[in-house]
Amino acid sequence: MLQNAFRGGRGYWALLGGWAILIALGTVAYGHQLTQGLTITGMSRDVSWGLYISQFTFLVGVAASAVMVVLPYYLHNYKAFGRMVILGEFLAVSAVLMCMLFVFVDMGQPARVMNVLLHPSPHSVMFWDFMVLTGYLALNLVIGSVTIEAERKEAPPPRWVRPLIYLSIPWAVSIHTVTAFLYAGLAARPFWMTAILAPRFLASAFASGPSLLILLALLVRRFGKFDAGREAVRALSTIVTYAMAINLFFVLVEVFTALYSGMPDHVRSFSYLFLGLDGHNALTPWTWVGEALAVACAILLLIPTVRHQERYLALLCGGVIAAIWIEKGMALIVTGFIPSPLEHITEYAPTLPEVAITVGVYAVGGLVLTTLYKIVLTVRERVQLA
Amino acid sequence: MDESRRRFLKSLGSVAMGAGCGLPLLDSARWLARPAAVPAAPTQWAMVIDLAKCSREDVQRACTEACRREHNVPSIPDPAEHIDWIWSEHYEHVFPDEVHAHMAEDVRQIPVLVLCNHCTDPPCVKVCPTQATWKRESDGIVMMDMHRCIGCRYCMAACPYGSRSFNWRDPRPYVERDAQGKPASDYPTRTAGVVEKCTFCAERIRTGRQPACVEAANQLPGGEGALTFGDVTDPDSDVSRLLRDENTICRKIGLGTGPNVYYIVPPSLAAIAHGGEA
Amino acid sequence: MRDRTGIVLGLGAVLAVAAFPLWNALGSKAERARPNLERAVEGPECVEDTLYMTAHHQDLLNEWRTAVVRTGERYYTSSSGKRYEMSLTGTCMKCHVNSGAFCERCHEYADVTLTCWRCHVAPEGS
């Protein structure tokens, strides 16, 4: 099975080479971080989580979104997703791996990571996040490899994988809910402490994840001669549309609660995002661009004639991913720390080494995804030839 | 590869992974089976801060310096990477719920000493994934285990009082040293990548001494009683007496954390503005 | 076998890498006779006997750390019945006053990295 990943043309090896270069750069930067400490990042005493944790938050959503293909196909026999499912599952593997790497590079003492297992702390949501992410990674790896191997043998997958697939459905929901609970249970951070955080996370996940999956499906159709099916892409686009609409509704609901109540604790964070606070407005351009993009994409996606044209769909999916990346990957985490518990405002911007490490982690995900997708493509090719 | 060989290698891999995951979990099983801890004498250390006396510049300096020297707390020049165990903030930031629009500017800016509150229900303890910070059953101190901290900084996100600092870099070069290059005390300096905060001078308490800040304030002329430290579960202790007799407030009491640092409010805040005493 | 050359070369490389600790230490400083440790300055005996301490001093220190930091205890009763304050800097290093001449020498010989002094304050003269 794995030997399929070693058989490829120039384009494939060039892509892997590109990932490898980015990984090397990220590794060098991480080496600096290990020797000098996290001072090389832009984080501070007030904003103690930054780019790494925000990427982790965004990618958990992408990982969870695999359920949007698994559920219709396995639970409701939606046959159109037949070839899309494996792409979704392997995307989930790559995404979860990146999540875990982002948490790892964020740690001040990464060599002690086993302490989480040696000293289990069920009262800590982070302990549970560690458990469910590891479990989800294992689940999707097993399910994905077993199903692709079954396809290679041109036989139905073994019966024991079915309960695992059913398990992966609530598990996917749980990984993003637990991640939301990391933030939503903290009385210290009024911007995060809202019951709607978990539903918001899920809605944005089900918009951004399938968007990425659509783009990947279009890419492998164009470059890998693997067609996941036009109906599958169309169905995914419907999911993205509804998820995006619901996500926007949730954002409006939050804005209403904060602004109508007028409570300073709640208003201040939204002020910081949209208007700036006490002259600090590093995030306002990002916020306005992100929200404008989100609204525009949501409206355009609602128009069937636009959504059904794959060329426009691809652009809109890119827009959805960008909008939600800004919302989750930039705005959410940093704004939770502004203002600080002592009402100070310290802004945050990632440093170059921090970005290099981030790009390196994304490249690891890219490498894993490319390799796994190559296996899928090669297996399909051989089955078709046979 | 031959089918049976592949199956063998796969099962070898699964066994190795199982053992690798299983062995640490065995330790977890031991943890679950541990005997219930029985505290020798349920103590809860607490501190009462007299706002009036502690607004004095000499008291503030004495307390913060004593702590810094006692624990080799580094002085990092970059304010974004400050490490503070006990330090000074303006009244309006410490007690935002006590401040209204018609309070004078100088009252709002009365300097107040802030530190870890060693809460009764600490959110930082709740979130720590390794119990590197936990509430000690013997004395109620919210303690730090520098050996176990993985530097995830979840506790910093969870603390509603901003009491925690992270070592973004190696603190050693920033620790105050004497002319011979010796650090101010024998207390272990920390390493990059761990979180630290006030520990109510646990190492002094166990030898029967008062925390460094309390001792420093009491040694100042006129500073006696600026900081009072004691067992709040003992009805005859100084802190219990003060809590009964004086008008005291806590920080962010509405969050339900149960802070154990109390502030005596003077009859007139305006009188102590400008760093004077009531 | 077609792949004989490749297999032999590969096996050779793996063996060379596996034996790295052996051939790397050849001729290095540590490859001498057992180091001469500068022992204690004062005090007739250590907390426990030498043989035990050589093998188990790290276990003892870990035990002390857990007792002091996590449980809030103060004293340790040795197997000879004597009571000691559980403190690396305050007890151990009061007798073993030079961590370089004592700890470092043996650790260099045994090639075990010492990380204690990154945080703990080494006694004067180390």
Image: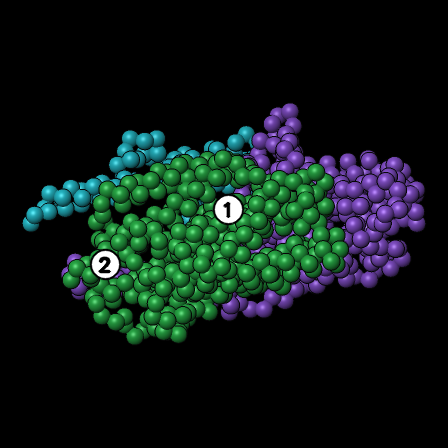
Using the image, name the chain to which the residue with label 1 belongs: A
**Quarter of the figure with the N terminus of chain A:** bottom left
Q: Is residue C84 visible?
A: no
Q: Around disc 1, counting alpha carbons within 10 Å, would you say few (fewer than 14), some (14 to 19), or many (20 or more)? A: many
Alpha-carbon distance for marks 2 and 1?
35 Å
Query: Mark 1: which secondary structure?
Result: helix
Left or right: residue A385 versus residue A161 is: left
Q: Position of residue A329 (x, y in %)?
A: 53, 49
Q: What residue do we see at 35% from left, 30% from top?
A: C29
Q: Nearer the viewer, residue B105 or C86?
A: B105
Query: What is the number of the mark on residue A18?
Result: none
Q: Which residue is mark 2?
A: A379
Chain letter for green? A
Above or below for B240 versus A292: below
Q: Is residue A229 visible?
A: yes
Q: Nearer the viewer, residue B221 or C91?
A: B221
Colour mode?
by chain
Q: Earlier in the sequence, mark 2 or mark 1?
A: 1
Q: Position of residue A98 (x, y in %)?
A: 43, 51
Between circles 2 and 1, the one closer to the viewer is 2
Chain letter for cyan? C
Residue farthest along the left direction in this orientation: C1
Q: Position of residue A117 (x, y in %)?
A: 47, 59
Question: Would you identify the image quadrant in which residue C10 lies?
Answer: top left
Q: What residue do we see at 66% from left, 56% from top?
A: A255
Query: What is the number of the mark on residue A52?
Result: 1
Residue type pointed to by label 2: Val
Quick check: marks 2 and 1 in contact, CB under 8 Å?
Answer: no
Residue type pointed to by label 1: Tyr
